[in-house]
Image (cartoon, helix red, strand yellow):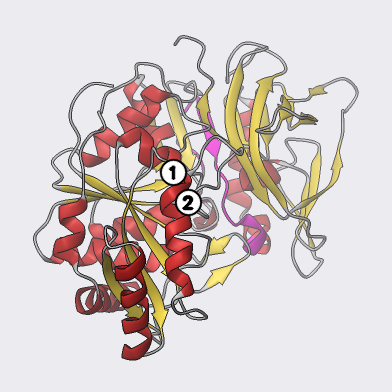
Amino acid sequence: MTGGLPPGVVIAAPSSGSGKTLLTLGLLRHFRDAGVAVASAKVGPDYIDPAFHRAAGGRPCPNLDLWAMREGTLASVLADSARGADLIVCEGVMGLFDGARLDEGSTADAARTFGWPVILVVDAAAQGASASALVGGFARHRPDVTVAGVVFNRTGSARHADILKAAMAQDHPDIPVLGCLPRLSGLTLPERHLGLVQAGEHGDLEAFLNAAAQAVAAHVDTPALRTLARATGRAGATDAAPIPPLGQKIAVARDRAFSFCYPHVLDGWRHAGAEISFFSPLEDEIPAADADAVYLPGGYPELHAGRLAGNACFLAGLRAAAAAGRTMFGECGGYMVLGDRLTDADGVSHAMAGLLPVATSFAERKLHLGYRRAVIAETGPLGPAGSALRGHEFHYATILTEGLDNGQDAPLFHVSNADGAYLGALGRRRGNVLGSFVHLIDREDNGA
């Protein structure tokens, strides 16, 4: 990696639900309002948190995936987002040492890779001095990762905060307590089956972000936190797009039903010379007439299945594009819409585009979650047969039918998980139309 980065910190925690997102959003809005050019990043595969980061800090937020991304991709997406910034605030994923595998892909790996110190957020609602032992364990666990400070969340009283601070001063005088956030009503974000309700659907996001910033300013020593930031990582660029461009002019579905699209993928297509246009299936729009490829990313089509099924122009536009030989690729929700039928949570079946032999149901829920190494079954728009891409699967839909049709269709990928266990064939390809439940993140490193 070449080129410098501004100093940064990682906001991490012992587990999910500890308060990482609240602290991160509060810091981003607080620093932005204070005139600090603050950039952000999110460790791991996540479509939702980065949109909240962007709303809070005013800058695009990249995903940094230590398992799925090549080193060059990591370097370039961070360099692009942090250009001109004074500070980077990176939000971790799950617990500090949780990753794709026991020894790969964790927030700790991101901290080590970019040289960022860790600010540990500990939910202290149900413990007092014992929290100091927990912090000590995390601080000693890996010598290549520095826990530089701690913020206790959901403290119950001034007395509770004093106990936490005293225990830390006695046990770990080298790890400062940067703040104690009390239990604050109203500082929660609504959730649904794939995580937080999207930023664009939040009823009063600005009020929430301002309240989070006020809480952080009142209860966290933000100047001290900023002095802990370090800049030992390096930035750079990669010449190879994360995912091969689907065409020269690519029409991308974008609205509340199709919002799970990684910006670094679109940026990679642009850098490779492709032109990107957008259309809204929910508004019954069709792909641009001059587009030679159509991309339907994931999202929440299961929440809008009736409306999508009734949007005759949209569905006819997809069918016409496919008949004209345009490349068409659907991921997860997009794959479901390219299929024959989608059954919603109430058990109502809705006709979809009918371009792939797959019917899915959101009424019969089953969680599918994990990293995926996807080897291309047959040479096509995503690359030559045998080449590998990396991504993740995260959905609750059940496949009712997914089969070959008189030899016209073929599997899209042969898939294994992060541990290398083979999971079978996944997805379908019918001529120029292809799709699967895998959200693609980057091509596998093959010297490109």
Magenta portion: prevailing SS class? loop
Examine the rendered structure and indicate whether residue 382 appears above or below residue 394. above
Q: Does residue 288 show up magenta in the picture?
A: yes
Look at 52% across and 81% down and name the residue there.
126
Look at 32% across and 69% down and name the residue there.
170
Tag 2–tag 1 contact (CB < 8 Å):
yes
Look at 36% across and 33% down and name the residue there.
113
Give the left or right position of residue 230, taking residue 366 as reference. left
Under mark 1, the amino acid is: Ala
Say which quarter of the image contains residue 436. top right
Could you say where residue 133 lies in the image, as x and y percent from the top left? 47, 65
Quarter of the figure with the C terminus: top left
**Structural distance between the alpha carbons of marks 2 and 1:** 6 Å
Q: In this figure, which residue is indicated by the disc labeled 1?
A: 108
Numbered range of the magenta stretch: 285-304
Say which quarter of the image contains residue 236. top left
Q: Does residue 242 show up magenta in the picture?
A: no
Look at the image and tell me whether residue 290 can be seen: no
Examine the rendered structure and indicate whether residue 445 appears above or below residue 288. above
Could you say where residue 443 lies in the image, as x and y percent from the top left? 52, 22
Say which quarter of the image contains residue 305. bottom right
Quarter of the figure with the N terminus: top left
Could you say where residue 159 lies in the image, as x and y percent from the top left? 34, 90
Q: In this figure, which residue is indicated by the disc labeled 2?
A: 96
N-term mark: 2 or 1: 2
